[in-house]
Amino acid sequence: MSHTGRSYTAPPPAYSQVPSSEPSSSRDPHVGEEWDVPEDFKVGVNVSDCDVSIRMAFVRKVYSILFAQLFMSTVVAGIMMYNDSVKYWVQTNGWALLLSTISTFILLIAVLWKRLSHPLNLQLLAAFTLSESYCVGTVVTYYDTEIVLQALILTTGIFVGLTLFTMQSKYDFSGMFPYSGFDLAYGII
Protein backbone atom coordinates (compact mmCIF):
# COMPACT_ATOMS: atom_id res chain seq x y z
CA MET A 1 0.00 0.00 0.00
CA SER A 2 1.34 3.37 -0.86
CA HIS A 3 0.86 6.58 1.01
CA THR A 4 -0.92 9.32 -0.99
CA GLY A 5 0.86 12.10 0.76
CA ARG A 6 -2.20 13.67 2.39
CA SER A 7 -1.42 15.77 5.38
CA TYR A 8 -3.97 17.00 7.86
CA THR A 9 -3.77 20.55 9.14
CA ALA A 10 -5.78 20.05 12.33
CA PRO A 11 -5.71 17.30 14.97
CA PRO A 12 -8.78 15.04 15.29
CA PRO A 13 -11.53 16.24 17.64
CA ALA A 14 -11.58 15.07 21.26
CA TYR A 15 -14.25 12.63 22.38
CA SER A 16 -15.95 15.29 24.48
CA GLN A 17 -16.64 17.34 21.34
CA VAL A 18 -18.86 14.66 19.78
CA PRO A 19 -22.52 15.75 20.03
CA SER A 20 -24.45 13.62 22.50
CA SER A 21 -27.84 14.00 20.82
CA GLU A 22 -26.99 11.56 18.03
CA PRO A 23 -27.37 7.80 18.52
CA SER A 24 -24.12 6.17 19.54
CA SER A 25 -24.61 3.13 17.32
CA SER A 26 -27.16 1.29 15.25
CA ARG A 27 -27.76 -1.08 18.19
CA ASP A 28 -28.93 1.81 20.39
CA PRO A 29 -31.88 3.33 18.48
CA HIS A 30 -33.72 4.49 21.60
CA VAL A 31 -31.48 7.41 22.47
CA GLY A 32 -32.94 10.88 22.61
CA GLU A 33 -35.55 12.93 24.39
CA GLU A 34 -38.54 10.80 23.34
CA TRP A 35 -37.24 7.63 25.03
CA ASP A 36 -36.94 7.68 28.79
CA VAL A 37 -35.12 4.39 29.28
CA PRO A 38 -33.35 3.82 32.59
CA GLU A 39 -29.71 2.81 32.39
CA ASP A 40 -30.13 -0.46 34.30
CA PHE A 41 -30.61 -2.51 31.12
CA LYS A 42 -29.03 -2.19 27.72
CA VAL A 43 -31.48 -1.92 24.84
CA GLY A 44 -31.41 -5.09 22.78
CA VAL A 45 -30.25 -7.41 25.59
CA ASN A 46 -32.66 -10.12 26.69
CA VAL A 47 -33.26 -10.67 30.38
CA SER A 48 -32.50 -14.36 29.89
CA ASP A 49 -28.94 -13.39 28.89
CA CYS A 50 -28.36 -11.40 32.10
CA ASP A 51 -27.00 -12.45 35.48
CA VAL A 52 -29.20 -14.55 37.78
CA SER A 53 -29.74 -11.66 40.22
CA ILE A 54 -31.03 -9.43 37.40
CA ARG A 55 -33.31 -12.20 36.13
CA MET A 56 -34.73 -12.79 39.60
CA ALA A 57 -35.31 -9.05 40.09
CA PHE A 58 -37.11 -8.95 36.74
CA VAL A 59 -39.32 -11.90 37.69
CA ARG A 60 -40.14 -10.27 41.04
CA LYS A 61 -41.08 -7.04 39.26
CA VAL A 62 -43.31 -8.88 36.77
CA TYR A 63 -45.07 -10.83 39.53
CA SER A 64 -45.58 -7.65 41.55
CA ILE A 65 -47.26 -5.96 38.59
CA LEU A 66 -49.34 -9.07 37.93
CA PHE A 67 -50.41 -9.19 41.58
CA ALA A 68 -51.52 -5.54 41.42
CA GLN A 69 -53.53 -6.26 38.27
CA LEU A 70 -55.23 -9.32 39.76
CA PHE A 71 -55.96 -7.43 42.98
CA MET A 72 -57.57 -4.55 41.10
CA SER A 73 -59.63 -6.98 39.00
CA THR A 74 -60.78 -8.79 42.14
CA VAL A 75 -61.81 -5.59 43.91
CA VAL A 76 -63.73 -4.23 40.91
CA ALA A 77 -65.42 -7.58 40.23
CA GLY A 78 -66.30 -7.97 43.91
CA ILE A 79 -67.92 -4.53 44.05
CA MET A 80 -69.92 -5.28 40.91
CA MET A 81 -70.99 -8.70 42.13
CA TYR A 82 -72.03 -7.86 45.71
CA ASN A 83 -73.43 -4.32 45.39
CA ASP A 84 -76.95 -4.68 43.99
CA SER A 85 -77.27 -1.11 42.70
CA VAL A 86 -73.92 -1.34 40.87
CA LYS A 87 -74.87 -4.77 39.53
CA TYR A 88 -78.19 -3.41 38.22
CA TRP A 89 -76.49 -0.41 36.57
CA VAL A 90 -73.84 -2.61 34.92
CA GLN A 91 -76.42 -5.05 33.57
CA THR A 92 -78.73 -2.34 32.20
CA ASN A 93 -76.05 -0.16 30.58
CA GLY A 94 -74.43 -2.29 27.91
CA TRP A 95 -72.76 0.72 26.30
CA ALA A 96 -70.31 0.89 29.21
CA LEU A 97 -69.11 -2.64 28.49
CA LEU A 98 -68.68 -1.79 24.81
CA LEU A 99 -66.75 1.37 25.71
CA SER A 100 -64.59 -0.57 28.15
CA THR A 101 -63.85 -3.28 25.59
CA ILE A 102 -62.85 -0.78 22.90
CA SER A 103 -60.73 1.20 25.36
CA THR A 104 -59.01 -2.02 26.45
CA PHE A 105 -57.74 -2.60 22.91
CA ILE A 106 -56.77 1.04 22.43
CA LEU A 107 -54.89 1.07 25.74
CA LEU A 108 -53.17 -2.20 24.87
CA ILE A 109 -51.80 -0.62 21.69
CA ALA A 110 -50.82 2.51 23.64
CA VAL A 111 -48.94 0.41 26.23
CA LEU A 112 -47.05 -1.29 23.42
CA TRP A 113 -46.29 2.05 21.76
CA LYS A 114 -45.04 3.74 24.95
CA ARG A 115 -43.43 0.69 26.56
CA LEU A 116 -40.10 2.48 27.03
CA SER A 117 -41.51 5.77 28.41
CA HIS A 118 -41.46 5.58 32.19
CA PRO A 119 -43.81 6.38 34.12
CA LEU A 120 -46.29 6.85 31.24
CA ASN A 121 -46.13 3.12 30.50
CA LEU A 122 -47.20 2.31 34.08
CA GLN A 123 -50.06 4.83 33.92
CA LEU A 124 -51.28 3.31 30.65
CA LEU A 125 -50.97 -0.17 32.17
CA ALA A 126 -53.05 0.93 35.17
CA ALA A 127 -55.74 2.35 32.85
CA PHE A 128 -55.69 -0.89 30.83
CA THR A 129 -56.06 -2.91 34.03
CA LEU A 130 -58.99 -0.79 35.21
CA SER A 131 -60.72 -1.13 31.84
CA GLU A 132 -60.12 -4.88 31.77
CA SER A 133 -61.36 -5.13 35.37
CA TYR A 134 -64.63 -3.51 34.34
CA CYS A 135 -65.03 -6.08 31.55
CA VAL A 136 -64.34 -8.96 33.94
CA GLY A 137 -66.65 -7.46 36.57
CA THR A 138 -69.47 -7.14 34.05
CA VAL A 139 -69.15 -10.78 33.03
CA VAL A 140 -69.03 -11.85 36.68
CA THR A 141 -72.40 -10.17 37.40
CA TYR A 142 -74.16 -12.68 35.13
CA TYR A 143 -72.85 -15.82 36.87
CA ASP A 144 -73.61 -17.59 40.12
CA THR A 145 -71.59 -16.27 43.05
CA GLU A 146 -70.41 -19.72 44.16
CA ILE A 147 -68.86 -20.57 40.77
CA VAL A 148 -67.07 -17.22 40.63
CA LEU A 149 -65.69 -17.69 44.15
CA GLN A 150 -64.44 -21.19 43.30
CA ALA A 151 -62.64 -19.84 40.23
CA LEU A 152 -61.20 -17.00 42.32
CA ILE A 153 -59.92 -19.36 45.02
CA LEU A 154 -58.35 -21.73 42.48
CA THR A 155 -56.71 -18.89 40.54
CA THR A 156 -55.44 -17.25 43.72
CA GLY A 157 -54.04 -20.52 45.04
CA ILE A 158 -52.16 -21.27 41.83
CA PHE A 159 -50.92 -17.70 41.54
CA VAL A 160 -49.70 -17.53 45.15
CA GLY A 161 -48.01 -20.92 44.85
CA LEU A 162 -46.21 -19.99 41.64
CA THR A 163 -45.27 -16.60 43.05
CA LEU A 164 -43.77 -18.04 46.23
CA PHE A 165 -41.88 -20.66 44.25
CA THR A 166 -40.58 -18.04 41.81
CA MET A 167 -39.51 -15.60 44.53
CA GLN A 168 -37.31 -18.14 46.31
CA SER A 169 -36.36 -20.41 43.42
CA LYS A 170 -32.78 -21.03 42.44
CA TYR A 171 -33.86 -23.00 39.37
CA ASP A 172 -33.24 -21.64 35.89
CA PHE A 173 -36.26 -22.25 33.64
CA SER A 174 -34.98 -20.36 30.60
CA GLY A 175 -34.07 -23.61 28.83
CA MET A 176 -37.59 -25.00 29.22
CA PHE A 177 -39.23 -22.42 26.93
CA PRO A 178 -39.74 -24.85 23.98
CA TYR A 179 -41.75 -27.18 26.21
CA SER A 180 -44.07 -24.48 27.60
CA GLY A 181 -46.30 -24.44 24.49
CA PHE A 182 -46.83 -28.19 24.73
CA ASP A 183 -47.57 -27.93 28.45
CA LEU A 184 -50.09 -25.16 27.82
CA ALA A 185 -51.85 -27.18 25.11
CA TYR A 186 -51.90 -30.25 27.37
CA GLY A 187 -53.34 -28.18 30.23
CA ILE A 188 -56.13 -26.81 28.05
CA ILE A 189 -57.10 -30.27 26.78
Image (cartoon, helix red, strand yellow):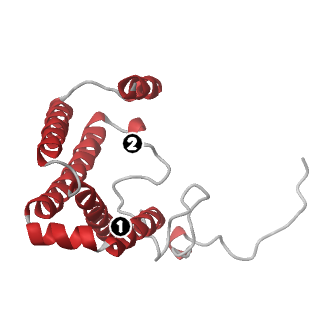
Quadrant in the picture for residue 52: top left
Quadrant in the picture for residue 141: bottom left
Circle 1 Cα neighbour tier, 10 Å, few/some/many (<14 / 14–19 / ≥20): some
Q: Can residue 175 be seen by looking at this rendering? A: no
State which mark lies toward you, 2 or 1: 1
Chain-order first, disc 2 or disc 1: 2
- Identify the residue under disc 1: 121
Figure check: 106 above or below 4 = below
C-alpha separation, residue under disc 2 versus residue under disc 1: 19 Å
Residue 85 percent location from the top left of the image: 11, 72
Figure check: 44 above or below 186 = below
- Identify the residue under disc 2: 47
Quadrant in the picture for residue 119: bottom left
- Asked if residue 36 lies left or right of residue 56, the reply is right
**Where does the C terminus fall, quadrant-wise?**
top left
- Asked if residue 3 lies left or right of residue 98, the reply is right
Q: Which element is circle 2 on?
A: helix
